Image (cartoon, rainbow, N blue to C red):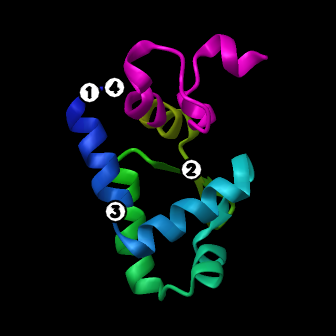
Amino acid sequence: METKTVIAALAALAQESRLAIFRALVQAGLAGLSAGKIGEITGIAPSSLSFHMKELTHAGMVTSRQEGRFVIYTAHFDAMNALLAFLTENCCGGQSCMPGCSPACANPEERSS
């Protein structure tokens, strides 16, 4: 993952409303949510929601698809996982992780056991 992409993703998520939206979309899974449902869950007004969705989409953290007359938004899980991998790729200096270290940071051999 390129540094510019990482910075854009982190900048998009570094805002309370957008983080709440992204977390709701992660929880919804691949089914995604309509804009109305996202607004209902997060309490964000439609005019603000549109702005935040644009920012998350531009950063590559959210995708959208048309279903009938609704636009369904989904967390871009590949981008999320790439971001997590980028942030943890040098965890513990390449040595076995310390006890209590995040599972995302554990060595691949340790994760599978």
Magenta residues, start to end: 84-113
Q: CA distance from mark 2 to mark 4?
A: 17 Å
Q: The residue tagged with tag 1: helix, strand or loop?
A: loop
- Nearest the viewer among 67 and 113 is 113
Q: Is residue 112 found left or right of 100 in the rendered image?
A: right
Residue type highlighted by circle 1: Glu
Mark 2 or mark 4: whose residue is earlier in sequence:
4
Q: Which residue is mark 3?
A: 14
Foreground label between 2 and 1: 1
User: Which residue lies at the image location 47% right of the left edge and 84% below the top edge?
Assistant: 46
Q: CA distance from mark 3 to mark 4?
A: 18 Å
Instruction: Check residue 92 for magenta coloring.
Output: yes
Instruction: Check residue 105 for magenta coloring.
Output: yes
User: Where, by quadrant of the figure, is residue 15 drawn?
Assistant: bottom left
Q: The residue tagged with tag 4: helix, strand or loop?
A: loop
User: Is 77 rendered above or below residue 92?
Assistant: below
Residue type highlighted by circle 2: Ala
Q: Is residue 37 found left or right of 57 in the rendered image?
A: right
Q: Which residue is mark 1?
A: 2
User: Which residue lies at the image location 53% right of the left edge and 34% below the top edge?
Assistant: 81
Residue ranking furthest to the left: 4
Q: Which residue is mark 2?
A: 75
Q: How many neighbours does mark 4 have within 10 angstroms: few (below 14), some (14-19), or many (20 or more)?
A: few
